[in-house]
Amino acid sequence: MADESNTGPVAAAEAVAETQAPAGKRKSSSRRQRTAAGQVAESKTTAKPKRYSETERADKLNLIEAEVAQGNSTLKDAIKSAGISEQTYYVWKKSAKPADRKPEESVVAGDDLADLIQLDKENLRLRNLLSDKLRAENAELRKRLGLD
């Protein structure tokens, strides 16, 4: 109990530390709010990127390819005149290629299936030929050995 009634310099320092700690937390939280408000203001100033449909993308890609094929401009200039970035052009071009290849792959798959069926028929024919040959050979050996 003697310690509780002690109002010396140690107790006074602890009381000061307790009162300063919550004030420090308030300041840091208000800084966070200011930072968050600043970030919100920055995000409102950025423009929303334009989204193109698949047909618009294909039209722009065809326009760029036509300009380059005619020799009117370089690829870089044609991309700029279309109003897109080089990175966007290459991303669109890459995504357009798998769509173009799908019909070819299905035709190839059909050819592969026909080849597989033909190989299966040939395999069956060769198996029958081999089994007939082995039967004839076995019959001949039995005659020679007198087992038949």
Image (cartoon, rainbow, N blue to C red):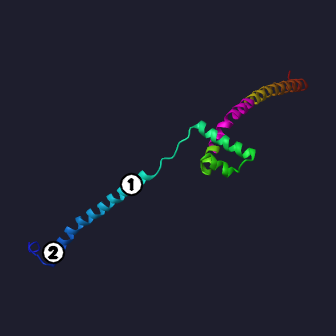
Q: Which mark is residue 124?
A: none
Vertical placement of residue 131 versus 85, above or below: above
Q: Residues within 10 Å of mark 1 (few under 14, many from 20)?
A: few
48 or 109, which is in the foreground? 48
Vertical placement of residue 84 versus 146, above or below: below
- Amino acid tagged 1: Ala
**Residue at (64, 48) in percent of width and height:** 79
**Residue at (71, 51) in percent of width and height:** 74
3 or 130, which is in the foreground? 3
Look at discs 1 and 2 and give the one toward the viewer. 1
Q: Quadrant of the N terminus?
A: bottom left
Q: Which mark is residue 41?
A: 1
Please name the residue that numbered disc 2 is placed on. 12
Q: CA distance from mark 1 to mark 2?
A: 45 Å
Q: Residue furthest bottom?
A: 9
Q: Which residues are magenta?
A: 94-112
The majority secondary structure of the magenta stretch comes to helix
22 or 41, which is in the foreground? 41
Q: Residues within 10 Å of mark 2 (few under 14, many from 20)?
A: few
Q: Residue furthest right?
A: 144
